[in-house]
Image (tube, rainbow, N blue to C red):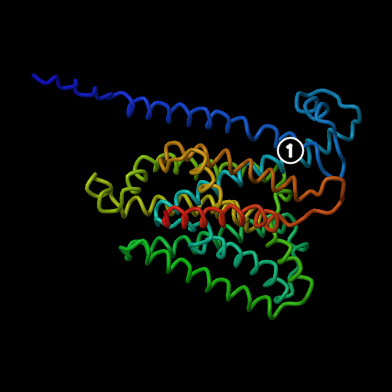
Amino acid sequence: MPIHPAPPKIDRQPPTRLKKEKIERRSIILGLLFILPIPFFLTSLAMGSVSIPLGDVVTILLGGIPQKESWSDIVIQFRLPKAITAILAGAALSTSGLQLQTLFNNPLAGPSVLGISAGASLGVALVILGTQLFGISLASLGAIGSYSTIVAACLGAGIVTGLVIVVARRVQSSTSLLVLGLLFGYATGAMVELLLYFSTAEPVKSYLNWTTGSFGGVTWEQLPIMSIGILSGLILAILVAPSLNPLLLGETQAQSLGISIERLRLLVLVSSSLLAGIVTAFCGPIAFIGISVPHLCRGLLKTSDLRWLFPAVSLVGGSFALVADIIAQMPGGRSVLPINSVTALIGTPIIAWIILRQQRNLAS
């Protein structure tokens, strides 16, 4: 009688164990990401035209007296609000980009695709260039003049957002909405070009300086307003996340799970527009952070689950903005590089690597 070998034992634990290992790995990475902004934050406070030792920076933050009293004013009055602004702006743009990439299922979707940033730019152009055309000086407006560009940018972004929301109620396809958003951006960009064409050199230079982006223009008086706007957008994004996650399976599957696509699209547009519009109003149009950071976080965590990605993009986005600001300071020098140039130089290799990696995976 032949002896048959015993059937192999099927180990049903590996899938569970593998899932547990992935969760543990992501938890460790996310924990490290919470620490990531700290060294960049301290470095941004220490570096600049005047170098301050890290020990003195910590002393100042703890309320102590540094070696030189002037260092306290430099850190508290200038560098600290700029660093906080960079963290908030990076987190806002990254979260906005993640939401839009998920909504449109487009890896290159970002805060600028719906024309929100272009609308804010048009509002600023109307203030800086339009006032010159009508013979009005911003200095003559007094206290209003210091907030005029911020108010104008918020109004411009809000008007474009309103148009996008109206269109979103009539258009069923997310792809069609994306195309219309790009058209809104081109239209507002054309209006800005016309204003530039009819303006003189000085206001044109002022406007172009604004378009390069900067985290250093936000004062302590303006920071609470910016913080409230960004935190409101982030809270709304967190509330939308449970409904946005099923959209990764496709709109049809999400609808079968009871998700209202029209309502979800509206909430995502409001949250993303609020985040992008506030940052553009206070810091100018900051490019690449909203597009590149979500991809970077997907690569780090190896997941598209928004429950992991939302905190990750906020932390990495804030760190990304701090690194860009540190590089822009040109340590040891007195000039400051445009933030948009720095973010583009950092973000372009990331996006190029993502595209090449996707092509390689498709080929294999």
Among all residues in the image, which is located at the extreme front? Answer: 1
Please provide percent x and percent y for residue 75. Answer: 80, 36
Please provide percent x and percent y for residue 257. Answer: 24, 44
In this rendered view, identify the residue nearer to me: 269 or 95: 95
In this rendered view, identify the residue nearer to me: 246 or 272: 246
Q: Is residue 68 above or below residue 202?
A: above
Among all residues in the image, which is located at the extreme left? Answer: 1
**Residue at 31% from the left image edge and 55% from the top image edge:** 262
Please provide percent x and percent y for residue 260. Answer: 28, 50
From the viewer's perspective, is 332 left or right of 214? right
Mark 1 belongs to which amino acid? Answer: Leu
From the viewer's perspective, is 89 left or right of 16? right
**Residue at 50% from the left image edge and 45% from the top image edge:** 233
Q: Is residue 197 above or below residue 230?
A: below
Please provide percent x and percent y for residue 145. Answer: 71, 59
Q: What residue does disc 1 label?
A: 80
Q: Quadrant of the N terminus?
A: top left
Q: Is residue 128 above or below residue 106?
A: below
